[in-house]
Amino acid sequence: MKGEVIDFEVLRIQSELENYSRTETLPHLLLNGAYNIDEIFDAYYDKLTPKHKLIADHLKSNYTTTLKHCITSLRMALKKEYVAVMRDLSTEHESFIFDHVMNKYRPGMNPVRALYYEVREVKKFYTSTNDYYVWLVTTLADKDFRSILLDAVGKDIARLEKILQQFYVPIVNNSQSIPLELFHAKQTVSDFRHYYTVFEAFDPEAFD
């Protein structure tokens, strides 16, 4: 009708309800915390079409069971995605594996993490008479190597952030416990961001 004000929030809710009707999975606006079930009924129910009111009624009556099923499915999907990313980290490429570095750490240590620890050490104890320290500084001073290193760290951050964006809010908002995969992904992103900053700012002239 001409001049009628369109309520886009109602249209969004109705679209999500239609998706629920087709898939029987909870609307994203509930999973991500944009709305809660009571808010939809208190503020928007009377604005829904009769068709969407019926869907909303069904959603409310089955909310607890559907939520439990959705969270279980999300946790399974999270685990699958997390394992896939961690098994194919760019920072674990052979380009960053140096035996005389890795031999100092536990088996399975991420090689870029090991290089970061070595940078911390060389900043404290560097001496030009130590061949290992000279090699490390020279390696990290190489612009091509450092560019490849930063690119790898950036790619891993982006892939892990994608997991967090997809799973963190719906699972945390609707669960009593946080899956270890989310905790580890969040911690790894934090660590890798720090490593990126350290490697990016690395100044070989500081060791002359």
Image: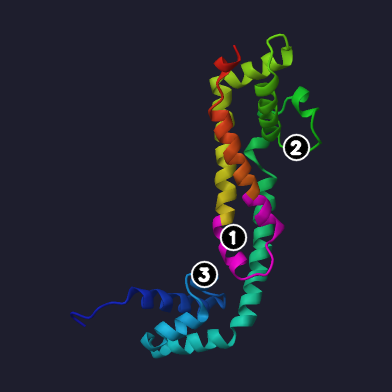
Q: In this picture, which residue range is highlighted in magenta? A: 165-186
Give the dominant element type of the magenta stretch: helix, strand or loop. helix
Q: Quick check: can you spot residue 77?
A: yes
Q: Nearer the viewer, residue 89 or 178?
A: 178
Q: Which of 139 and 190 is in front in this view?
A: 190
Q: Which mark is residue 109?
A: 2
Q: Name the residue under label 3.
A: 33
Q: Earlier in the sequence, mark 1 or mark 3?
A: 3
Q: Is residue 143 above or below residue 76?
A: above
Residue type of the residue flagged with mark 3: Gly
Taking the view exactly as shown, the residue that stands out farthest to the left is 2
Residue type of the residue flagged with mark 1: Tyr
- Give how far apart the Cα atoms at labels 1 and 2 are: 26 Å
Whole-percent x, y for residue 161 in the image:
56, 50
Q: Which mark is residue 168?
A: 1
Q: Nearer the viewer, residue 110 or 200?
A: 200
- At numbered mark 1, what does the secondary structure look like: helix, strand or loop? helix
Q: In this view, does 132 lie above or below 150?
A: above
Q: Which of marks 1 and 2 is nearer the N terminus?
A: 2
- At numbered mark 2, what does the secondary structure look like: helix, strand or loop? loop
Residue type of the residue flagged with mark 2: Met
Whole-percent x, y for residue 61 in the image:
57, 88
Q: Quick check: can you spot residue 93?
A: no
Q: Which of marks 3 and 2 is nearer the N terminus?
A: 3
